[in-house]
Image (cartoon, rainbow, N blue to C red):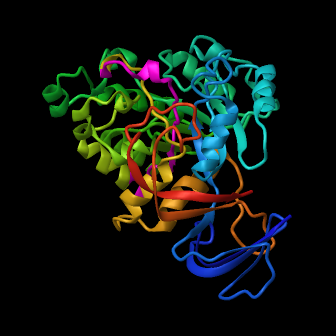
Amino acid sequence: MPRHLLRQVRLIDPIASLDRVTDVLLADGVIAEIADSIDAQADEVIDRPGLVLGTGLIDLYSHSGEPGFESRETIDSLMQAAKAGGFTQVAILPDTHPAVDNPANVDRVRQLAQGDEVQLHVWGAFTQDAAGNALSELVELAAAGVVGFADGQPIANSALLRRLLEYTQPIDRPIALYCCDPKLAGNGVMREGANSIRLGLPGNPAMSETSAIAALLEIVAEIHYRTGSTVRPAKLIRDGSPVHLMRLSTARSVDLIRTAKAQGLPITASTTWMHLLLDTNDLISYAPSLHLDPPLGNPIDRQALIAGLQDDTIDAIAIDHSPFTYEEKTVAFAEAPAGAIGLELALPLLWRCLVKSGQWTAIDLWRKLSVDPARCLGLSLNAIEPGKPANCILFDPEQIWRVDEQTLKSRSSNTPWYGQEIQGRVVRVWR
């Protein structure tokens, strides 16, 4: 395999909390040497000031069109998009057609994955057909190697949710839950507030999310803690399957998670990258690609999500890449399916918003996109050090490129940044 010598690259290793300028030699897919100056033969020497070498990024959950909706995205195009965005591991949700709710469909999706530069993980549907009515064969799915259980949709049946958490206690796989009360959400297409009134769009109240989170936390507490007659919660019985709360989008949700973690509940949480960059003020364009689920928050929600990530109330940033065809998204805002692509755009836009602005350090951002998602999924991640596999990406934070059909690897283009120039691009991936 070729040898690559990177001269005076900015090395960001969130595992070792390292941010330094150094030379790095990669040989035969392994980190061969890290030193202030390296004098060695190499097949390729990369000597460009300002480049950033970091651990490969990990996405907690995204959507694939294939099988069933290949016009939106195939497994191959998804992996190409992930590689282009610096994600070396991606976990896909099971809401395909057919749904990944049995071992045969797990194997089918894995067989579609080609190449070794992006590792594909598969969430198994915890209900049959991801429809929220009856539990899947969870033990068989775990034996088939799913990374965890998720439907990607809210569960309206609290009794079913309780059974799910009880049955998975001995399985030791994360359970990712999207908390939303569909009846409270109604026909809302943006977060309820002054802006929803001003824009004339049906509002989805924050309590549609927070009431569902509060109910879930009560179930988790009841299952994971022994209840005393006067003190509750008391002694932790066992950890069991960790519960992951997906797609947090409101300030009150952050408060609920912070309180639950302070009480010792075994939970993790994530928000999506677009909820950190945009809020209801940005919906003045009525761009269908800004119709998301959950909807973009009000400005106070966006700031609370950023603060929640900074103090580790929220564990990780997810991409929730949701491809749709041009025809599906070229409709009125309220009629468009909810979701946007993001694997190729998240790192450069988050870098500009959070790191370049001085709000976060580069290590902070990299940790929330790599180490912490790995921890939520129960995966291990190697530091960038001599003798370790070269699972790393090279990022140019200054490179300017135009987001269009010539540059995107995804089959879909449903992003509000389509047709715009953005700064920052992944230029190389080693895995």
The span shown in magenta is: 308-333
Q: Residue at x 70, y 20 (%)?
A: 101
- Who's the residue at 41% across and 23% down the image? 329
Residue at x-position 35% and y-position 18%: 331
Left or right for 189, reference 224: left
Q: Can residue 234 be seen in this view?
A: no
Above or below for 281 versus 35: above
Asked if the magenta segment contains residue 267, the reply would be no
The x, y position of residue 285, in whole percent, is: 25, 33
| Quadrant containing the C terminus in the rendered view | bottom right
Of the pair 301 and 179, the residue shown nearer to us? 301
Residue 315 lies within the magenta run: yes
Q: In the visual, does 274 lie left or right of 206? A: right
Figure quadrant of residue 377: top right
259 sits to left or right of 154: left
Whole-percent x, y for residue 278 in the image: 32, 44
Q: Spot the residue most to the top.
A: 133
Is 381 placed above or below 362 here? above
What residue is drawn where x is 59% and y is 40%?
Answer: 409
Quarter of the figure that contains the N terminus: bottom right
Nearer to the camera, 236 or 391: 391
How many tags in the picture?
Answer: 0
